[in-house]
Image: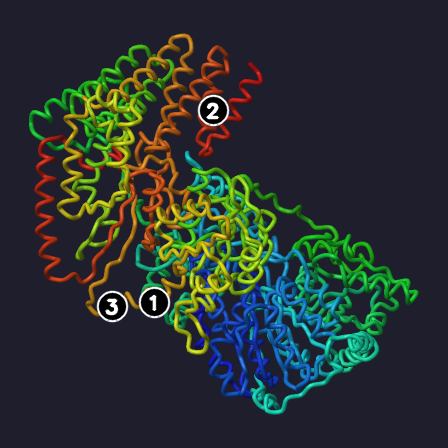
Amino acid sequence: MAERSFKAEVEHLRKGAGTSFTGEGILAITKALLENGVGYVGGYQGAPISHLMDVLADAEDLLGELGVRYEANASEAAAAAMLAASVHYPIRGAVTFKGSVGVNVASDALANLASSGVTGGALVVVGEDYGEGSSIMQERSYAFAMKSQFWLLDPRPNLPSIVKSVGDGFGLSEASNTPVMLMVRIRSCHVTGTFECRENQRPDLTVRDALANPQRDFSRVVLPPMSYQHEHDKIDNRWPAAEKYILDNGLNERFGPKEGKVGLICLGGMYNSVIRALQRLGLADLSGNTDVPLYVMNVTYPLVQSDLLDFCEDKDAVLMIEEGQPEFIEQQLGAMLYKAGSSTKLEGKGTFPKAGEYTGQVMKDGIDDFLRTYAAHLLPGQVLAPNEPAPEIPDLSQTVPIRPPGFCTGCPERPIFASMKLVEQELGKHQISADIGCHLFAALPPFEIGGQTMGYGLGPASNAAFDGGGEKRAISILGDGGFWHNGLSSSIGNMVFNKSDSVAIIVDNYYSAATGGQDIPSSRAKNPSKATNNPITKALEGAGVKWIRQIDRTYDVTQMRATIREALTTDYDGPKVIVASSECMLNRQRREKPQRNAAIKDGTRVEVPRFGVDEDICTGDHACIRLSGCPSLSLKKLDDPLRDDPVAHIDQTCVGCGNCGEVADAAILCPSFYEARVVHNPTGFERWTAGLRNRMISWLQNRRAARRLTFSTDLSEGAA
Amino acid sequence: MSIELPIASGGGATHLDGVIKVAILAVGGQGGGVLTNWIESLARAEGYSAQATSVAGVAQRTGATIYYIEMAPASVPTPVFSLAPAQGDIDVMIAAEMMEAGRAIMRGFVTPDRTTLIASTHRALAVSEKMVPGDGMADAAEVRAAAETAARQLVMADMEQAAVGVGSVISASLFGALAGSGALPFKRAAFEEAIRAGGKGVEASLRAFAAGYDLAQGGKEAPAAAASTPAEAAKPAGSAGKLRAYGALLDRINALPAAVQELALPGLRKVVDFQDIAYGAEYLDRLEGILGRDSADRGYVLSREAAKYIANAMAYDDVIRVADLKTRASRFDRIEDQVGSADKLMTLTDYLHPRAEEIAGLLPAGLGARIEASPVWMKRLDRLFNKGRRIRTDRFRGFALLYVMGGLRGWRRKSRRHALEQAHLDDWLNRAIGYLPSSYDMAVEVLRCRRLIKGYSDTHTRGLSKFDRVLDGARLVETRDDGPEWVARLREAALQDEKGEALDGALKTIRSFI
């Protein structure tokens, strides 16, 4: 069950011609795939296209009606490999994954797909962006487009343009027998807007039909000498065909006056921020009518040389607006202009910072700078010489704390890392290798566990140099998502085969949790269209792991700690794998809360747990927080003049997971923690015994109160 | 913010002929997405074109995240909206938490020429603030001051309380505040319609909306929860004899200078509550002893600190105190109130983990000392007692166990732990007083070092060791003029991190110049 359900929105995917669709970018892409007669879809979840996978999963019924095959692929490599169906068959296929990590994982399949070439349109939708919310921005998918020679679309970030680019992508792919990558930026995936619908199209040839008539063509196989021919085919036929298609169909766009001394060239995805900068410089209106000639590359690879040279002709200077580095496009454009003997000056990096995202301010400054140098006459007087100086804003950089993402309230991974921290306190620091997933948050305070992360499913593999063991054993972390993605072979298989004397901890939270709670083979839920409930331990046994410990309640910190300690100290010198399983709390709450509320309403007996801290017993040392970081475990300043430091406090968002109590017990921190369970709809007998107990307890309490001085408020609440 | 708001003309911060830019900075789980949807559908319903963007994912997982909405009137054909907020280009900034307001200001999203800043003043503490052993909470006053300079119009109130108080969530009260601020050119009814169109938890959301609206319109915040009543008003209850004896102690308090009384009264209450009236008399003996060597010229700073820290030292955290506090009726009431179990039943499990040290501490002073000195006996005790215990304090057996422990107060003065605490207390006081009369400030600073001793078991041991190291450091600088400042610096350093790395650094610095 994914974090977000699109069941309601998916109904909009049935809309026909003459209606309009209002919603998010990812839904628009899905609708566009259906309107373009896609025959099969698949992919691997990851921000920002996780929701695209969720939409597809929720739309499975509709896909089935249209004869479209949907596959939740095991990895990006598996997704890219699925596009092989379009090599021999005229079937349109689309897969989606996160860029640039996705293209890295899928590179083998992508290279071979691009070499073989395609008959049916093959589209890879990659989610990629610089900046806030993008975790993998250290590389660009652009390099992959260049090296494997598949085409890259980067449409303007509004729904009609994104929808159009899906059709353009299939068309371009078929016209040039080349797979096409459609890049959508993180905010474009979630941008809202409206577009006019067309009817959904059944694929001309479904994958079922194709199976009945298998095709094969020796010349498409990537084996010498055919691969040499593919190489020529790319340059001699596919590339020119692509350029022609792009020109004929006007995939790239020009805005603003035809003539001008200067021009701007930007990627489609950056169009809106360029227009905003021009608006702020007084050079464009709200509808995007600009005074500066603008060339928008909705296709960023290949570059259409004739078109670009035409745009640059008679211009003194052009500014290439390309975020990220290296500046692939600027380099190509520079070579083009130079070889053509052009006198047009090319600006780009230098005017813009070489690294870092082009925020609104950077964009405005860069264009302003360029125009001041080459076309100052265009700029309004107010921009050239502003009347007022920029306002002075107080500096808060020393005051405002950073707030990186972390484990949710009640996260079952928290006690695992609390246990690891406790073991470290006993046995000293260990070499720890992390993986990709929510558990990577353990690298941040308060745990600060894990020194590197090499890739999805590669946690144990990245400790391979330490497999020989030593005075202390290396520890690696692997999530259940990473385990099924790549970890079973690359990490676990590697450990077994190399007789690794180290410890791997598999964090099993029943889902691919970090990407939004999608099901995976070991998920415990029943999934009508996928095979779940395949235990990780069985896979481990099958792979040859002998020392396996399954923990079914990670919140039991004492047991968790004992198991980790055992793995680190046992005489057994082969691979030691701990599978620490408890359900992702975010998903669990989403599932259980409505059920619980309904049960309470129905009069069923329900216990709702919550933890608390006795504030007069807490001394304000915050050791519990240093072993937790739980959002609901916070601080409270007491109104007590005798107290200097705030005390721990658990707010009403507590879900009663018990981590704080368990940690306080295991680490022998303090006796402040208690668990209070509210019993809804108790039985009559329960009420009766509770009444009896309460009377006895009250009698004792009154007895003691009578023998001492009692102050009207708790001392902790102060003599206030 | 006027009450009669010419809503149709907006708050003036917006450019009615152009795009209105609204950014929301929220912490995961605050409903920033819901608020964004409301604003977007409000704008669309009012005939505006609108576009919203967000970065999902981080939002769920407690990080700080930005939602962004742009809207333009229907008169603008096919507007080109930006997908991300830009510095100096925001009309309305909504910050769902105080430090997020600070972050918005820091990022340049709040500028005096145009921005209406709507911020909730409540705090959701960041991990870095919470994990400090001392007080690591960021200074909200600085953010408030910055907001007053940076914003064109400012709406600041506890929107969390406003929402939770009426059984809803902060997104609704912020939406109300947005309506109340007049920053958008839409009528109140249109905002409420957007909530109704959303269809989920409508009634509660509308209540929170109204609360936020009133706050933005200059309404009053709900009175602070803790209404402070003068200490004198809270008279204790008890037998006539006890009250008489306590009255005699109060007379002694009343004879103290006012500045000292302020802390001596809660101090007295704390020690009497911890032990008994005689113990309270001992407290006052100690305090008066110090007062005798203090002077009005220094504002009785020394005695004030003594009043505070002697009380804390005398009311140490032992098993008896914990058991006593856990079995009081007032505690049961407080928890029932917190979890809202008034008309239901409640179970209560206490997480306790006694060690051999706690048991030895309960024994008679001599015997306890001998056992503590014997590793064999300590091991034996550990085997018997060192175990995590979940005590069901709501059940009779669990309650009775703690009740009996709490009843050992009469025994306490004979215990090993008491002897240890007394000796430690005396050492510390003598050490501080030893600096008088020549170095008054050193004496004050040494008294204040008592703040370092807190926690139980390992934490307590670590606190003691930090205390010792700071006092050792104090010895190094005791003859210097800036000695007291160094002691204060050492103490602050000791409170910065768990292991005392900052303290080691500060000590190293001291050693470098002596």
Lower position in the chain sequence, tag 1 or tag 2:
1
How packed is label 2: few (under 14 Cα within 10 Å), some, or many (20 or more)? many
Q: Give the residue type at disc 2.
A: Leu
The circle drawn on residue A599 is 3
Residue A116 location in percent, x, y? 73, 77
Eyeballing the image, is A714 above or below B180?
above
Left or right, residue A441 beside residue A76: left
Residue B191 picture quarter: bottom left
Residue A315 picture quarter: bottom right
The circle drawn on residue B490 is 2
Secondary element under disc 3, as helix, strand or loop, is helix
**Outermost residue to the right:** A341
Eyeballing the image, is A149 above or below B411?
below
Q: CA distance from mark 3 to mark 2?
A: 56 Å
Which of the chains bears the disc numbered 1? B
Number of numbered tags placed on the structure image? 3
Q: CA distance from mark 1 to mark 3?
A: 19 Å
Q: Are marks 1 and 3 in contact (CB under 8 Å)?
A: no
Residue A6 location in percent, x, y? 46, 74
Residue nearest the observer in this picture, A186 or B154: A186
Q: Give the residue type at disc 3.
A: Ala
How packed is label 3: few (under 14 Cα within 10 Å), some, or many (20 or more)? some
Which of the chains bears the disc numbered 3? A
- Per the image, the residue denoted by label 1 is B201
Residue B435 picture quarter: top left
Whether residue A532 is visible here, answered yes or no, is yes
Secondary element under disc 2, as helix, strand or loop, is helix
Which of the chains bears the disc numbered 2? B
Q: Nearer the viewer, mark 1 or mark 2?
A: 2
Secondary element under disc 1, as helix, strand or loop, is loop
Residue nearest the observer in this picture, B81 or A522: A522
